[in-house]
Amino acid sequence: MDASDDKPRSHISQQFNTDLEDLKKHMLEMGGMVEKQFSGAMQALIEADSTLGERIAADDDLLDQMEMKIDEECNLIIARRQPAARDLRLVLAIVKAIRDLERIGDESSKIAKAAIKMSEQGEFPEGIVDFRSLGDKVQRMVHRALDSFARYDADAAIAVVHEDKSVDNDYAIAMRSMVTFMMEDPSTISKVLNVLWALRAVERVGDHAKNICEHVIYMVAGTDVRHLNPNKMSAKINA
C-alpha cells in the first residue's frame, strides 16, 4: 500500500503543521531511547554485567517522564486544534504508541534487573544462543515498527506483524529448552528462573512492537486491525 497519500495534510496554520511534526519527532525520539534501552538490557543480561544493568534499569524513570510529556502535548493539540480525519488519527496513534514504548521500557528494566541477579549467580546457563537470537529478532521488530511509523508505511508495518509469529515460536522453543535444563539439573533452578523471567520480557517487547504496527495501520488506513492475522490485515486495508 502506497502511504504517500495518507500522510497528514498541510494546513493554513503553519503552527499546526509544526505542532504535528514536533509531536511525531518527540515520539520517535522516545522510540530511539527505547531501542537503546532494550539493546543495553540484552547486552547486560548476556554478559551478566551488573553495572550496565543498573544503568539501564535507572533509565526507566526518564522514559516515564517522556511518556507524560508527549501525552500532554497530544492533549493540548486535541484541545486547541480539534484535529480531524488523518490528523486526529496521527495524534491518537501517537498516544497509543507511547504507551507501548513505555511498556517496552518496563520490560527492558525487568531484563536489566535479571542481568544484575545473573551477575551475582555466575556463569550463564545453557540456552544462551536461543536467547540471543530471540533478542536480536525482537530488536529488529522494534526498529522496523518505528521506521514504519516514521514513513507512514502500512505495508512495512504488516511485515513486522508477520514476524511476531516467528518470535512466539522461538520463545516457546527457548522456554522448553530452559525448562528441560532445569529439570535435568535442579541446582540451576534459581539461575534458570531469572532467564525464564527475562525471556518472557523479551517476548512481551515483541508484542508491543506489533501493537505499534497496528497503530501505524490505523493511522494510515483508518482501519482497526487489532485481533486480525497479517493476511487479513492486508486484505482489509486494500479492500
Image (cartoon, helix red, strand yellow):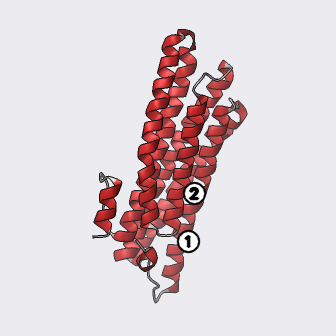
Q: Disc number at residue 156? A: none
Residue extending farthest to the bottom is 12
Mark 2, other Cα within 10 Å: few <14 / some 14–19 / many ≥20? some
Amino acid type indicated by mark 1: Asp
Which residue is drawn at the image coordinates 64% and 23% (left, top)? 124
Q: Could you tell me residue 99's position as x and y percent?
A: 45, 52
> CA–CA distance between discs 1 and 2?
12 Å
Write down the residue under mark 1: 22
Of the numbered discs 1 and 2, the one sitting upstream in the chain is 1
Residue 79 visible: no
Nearer to us in this view, 214 or 79: 214
Which residue is drawn at the image coordinates 60% and 56% (left, top)? 32
Q: Could you tell me residue 30's position as x and y percent?
A: 57, 57
Which residue is drawn at the image coordinates 46% and 31% (left, top)? 173
Picture quadrant where residue 190 is located: top right
Q: Is residue 146 above or below residue 221?
A: above
Q: Is residue 183 above or below residue 99?
A: above
Query: The residue tagged with tag 1: helix, strand or loop?
Result: helix
Write down the residue under mark 2: 30
Mark 1, other Cα within 10 Å: few <14 / some 14–19 / many ≥20? some
The N terminus sits in image quarter = bottom left
Which residue is drawn at the image coordinates 55% and 71% (left, top)? 22
Q: Could you tell me residue 63's position as x and y percent?
A: 57, 50
Q: Could you tell me residue 79's position as x and y percent?
A: 39, 72
Amino acid type indicated by mark 2: Met
